Image (cartoon, coloured by chain):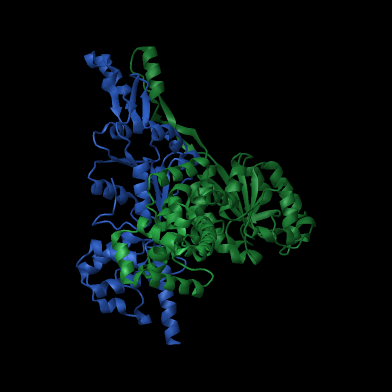
Amino acid sequence: MHFKGTKDYVATEDLRVAVNASIALERPLLIKGEPGTGKTVLAHEVAGALGVPLIQWHIKSTTKAQQGLYEYDAVSRLRDSQLGDAKVQDIGNYIKKGKMWEAFTSTERPVLLIDEIDKADIEFPNDLLLELDRMEFFVYETGEQVKAVQRPIVMITSNNEKELPDAFLRRCFFHYIKFPDADTMTEIVNVHFPDLKGKLLTEALNVFYEVRETPGLKKKPSTSELLDWLKLLLVEDIDPEVLKERDPTKLIPPLHGALLKNEQDVTLFERLAFLARRESRG
Amino acid sequence: MFYTLFTQLRRVGVPVSLKEYLLLLEAMSMNLAGYQVTDFYYLARAALVKDERHLDKFDQVFSFVFRGMEYLDEVMTAELPDEWLKALTEKFLTEEEKAEIEALGGWDKIMEELQKRLEEQEKRHEGGSKAIGTGGTSPFGNSGYNPEGVRIGQEKGRHGKAVKVWDKREYKNLDDTVELGTRNIKVALRRLRRFAREGAPTELALDETIRETAHKGYLDLVFRPERHNTVKVLLFFDVGGSMDPHIRLCEELFSAARTEFKHMEYFYFHNCPYEFVWKNNRRRHAERTDMWEVLHTYPADYKVIFVGDATMSPYEITYPGGSVEHWNEEPGGLWMQRITEIYDRAIWLNPTPERYWHNTPSIQIMQQMMGDRMYGLTLDGLDNAMKELSK
């Protein structure tokens, strides 16, 4: 199993090394990075490229580690018992498999995505230590030991909202997806919009990086926002000349709403444009 | 193997443990880095560094360790007999590469070229000849590979690029204690969160329900209140004067704190808290809140955070009438004492870099009054401060 990037996803070399190391050594890979740099998409692409199933476990603030293993539906059992249902005798009927169980018993070696692990309670990663390490757990209700047939490829994404415990980190490979440089960005855009006119792309990227460099932005536009913006530019059929416009009186790029998501940023940007205009006059 | 890298990383404070070191060795023994120094760099980074804050440190250490090896290489290259190198060529190079050497004018020509380059070389050359080194063959193998494969093929850029990757230090921004954005502050503030059940019972308590139902013999639903963050925070911000350069930082802290806590009250003061504070900075002279009122309104389980540079004349703290803005009957220090006596969870965050603290007497006085609970307004400081508060 070797991941080389896909035709829809540009994986930089360091990312490839990290992914392949985690596949070969069967350790989880922890992915961090600015929002919109393709953390979640990576797992989809790895699964796609290797041709294996993808099992996604999206974490919310209420998610418990136990839910990933299994859940015991006591309420149904209680109800059934009052109805005199024969199902009640077998407790296994009320055990619902969680995503990790699913991944452990999958016939093919799957990719297990634990998405946004930092959303969960602070103890969440600690509760999964043993399960991720040994890839086995015990079902108390039925006395069953679940052990992974093949160790799944585990990918974990985090948005850094919480610090993860050291013991957890020690078991993972780590990769920080840094914001792509202009070259990589061109590659990424080409993958998504192959028919984009070369000139439009260059100009758009210039504008994009300029916007990103505006000092004081609360939320810098990311890759996914760039892709959205390009889509809009294509739909609107904007002429590359418009983007090339360095005339300070028209400093605000067209459809900038796709890039700037925060009204304070938009105001800031407009104010800067206004200042530039005044300077050019004076 | 790579023990220096490991120890050096630990020395600069990157938290690498034995487990991670062994993981790296395991990866190496499975030949994951493929004897490419760039790949080795990526692999080592993925295995040893677990936090983007440490990436920059890692790059520097890697560059340091790497550079040492580079010098070693040069010495050895100069002393190596040709025959050894030739023999090793046979061993390590693919047919393709051999053909390439031929194309370049054969072995002797290359050695000549190499000699020339060695002489021309500046102190630091690129081209990372460590490839074999990482694979763990003998030091001779190390340099043996070097002349044809790497250095002369430099323009191919592979290894040259590699050196740049860590020398670029792209992760500098992520490093350290200096960078402090709203998000980071939020993460730090979250340490303070403490959940408890309070208020109206709206959530089904499943375990209780089962127990009660079993006990009574009919379905009995039990509810309990939802969990909420119960931390209460009282913030005092120093505004104006010497604090002006730090306004942006404080704004960020403030906006982050606001969304993080359910019970959060803030007040402004200037330089040192006296008998009144205010909530609206524009109307600071019109709408004041008596400090006694504040102390009486908020119970002692509030956590108090002062944010200020504590840079002023010492008289402003220690003498009545020392305030620069009004006549204060009682010295600021007395008010500080009252506050810290009521709220035993209190800290002071100071945006002035910590290394200047000992130059300013007023900071030292303040720190003493806070019982050494003054922290720099950096990620690190904030982290420690929150630890102190949540103890």
Q: Position of residue B253 (x, y in %)?
A: 54, 55
From the viewer's perspective, is residue B78 above or below residue A144?
below
Instruction: Classify residue B148 by image quadrant.
Output: bottom left
Residue A164 visible? The answer is no
In the image: residue B49, left or right of residue B316: left
Q: Quadrant of the N terminus of chain A?
A: top left
- Give the residue at the far bottom of this rendering: A282
Which residue does the image show at 38% across and 60% down from the upper left?
B89
Instruction: Classify residue A146 by image quadrant.
Output: top left
Apparent colour of chain A: blue
In the image: residue A274, left or right of residue A81: right
Q: Position of residue B96 (x, y in %)?
A: 28, 62
From the viewer's perspective, is residue A244 above or below residue A150?
below
In the image: residue B66, left or right of residue A112: right
Chain shaded green:
B
From the viewer's perspective, is residue B391 above or below residue A11?
above
Residue A252 visible? The answer is yes
Of A10 and B241, the residue lying toward us: A10
From the viewer's perspective, is residue B125 above or below residue A120?
below
- Give the residue at the far front of this rendering: B83
Q: Position of residue B112 (x, y in %)?
A: 43, 73
Q: Position of residue B90 (x, y in %)?
A: 35, 58
- Give the residue at the far right of this rendering: B319
Marker count (numbered): 0
Instruction: Classify residue A179 by image quadrant.
Output: bottom left
Q: Quadrant of the C terminus of chain A?
A: bottom left
